[in-house]
Image: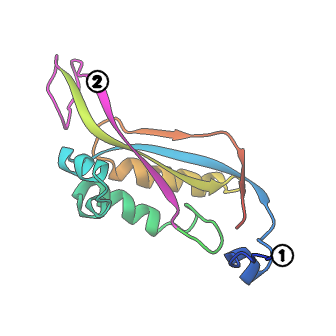
Amino acid sequence: MATTTITPEPTAQDREGAPAPVRRRTVRTIKVYWPVATATLTACAKGDLDALRADESFAALLRIVETSPELGDFGVYGDVFEVSLGAEGFSVRPGARPSLGSVGGRFLSATLAVTTYVDAATDDDTLARLLDRLADAHPWEVPVIELSAPLDLVSRA
């Protein structure tokens, strides 16, 4: 009986050698909740991610990420961020100057949750400058921006 040996096609790893070692580094996440047009959210949900660049409000956030080398630095990749589609609900209280809705009403806003990373060793002045830029560009009266405690990020970068 003859024996046949089947040799699988080489993988990218086989062609390029071993993958880079796993690297752990300490970062902080910056998560910004950013309103977009309902049409933008709908287009994204259908797979049209180019709609993000076309959204005037979101373009302001992209400019900050793309011009802040401290944000989303993954070595051979820069300006790294993730986007989650969603909605935010809120009630407008007296004294507010809402960009959406009116005092006394309850509203929903098409919103993106945008997460990026900054090295945990970033000095306080630089971090404050980055957060100020995000808050200043944000279209809401009260921006929602989360800054995590330092955490370990694992990657091959």
State which quarter of the image contains the N terminus: bottom right
* Amino acid type at mark 2: Phe
Judge from the rendering whether residue 144 lies leftward or rightward of residue 68; answer left or right.
Answer: left
Query: Which of marks 1 and 2 precedes in the sequence?
Result: 1
Residue that carries the numbered disc 2 in the rendered image: 90
Magenta range is 79-105
Task: Rate crowding at label 2 as few (under 14), some (14 to 19) or many (20 or more) other CA atoms within 10 Å.
Answer: few
Percent x, y of residue 83: 43, 50
Q: Which residue is farthest left?
A: 102
Residue shown at the point (28%, 24%) measured from the top left? 90
- Magenta highlight on residue 44: no
Helix, strand or loop for disc 2: strand
Residue that carries the numbered disc 1 in the rendered image: 3
* Amino acid type at mark 1: Thr
Percent x, y of residue 57: 26, 54
Helix, strand or loop for disc 1: loop
State which quarter of the image contains the C terminus: bottom right
Percent x, y of residue 143: 37, 39
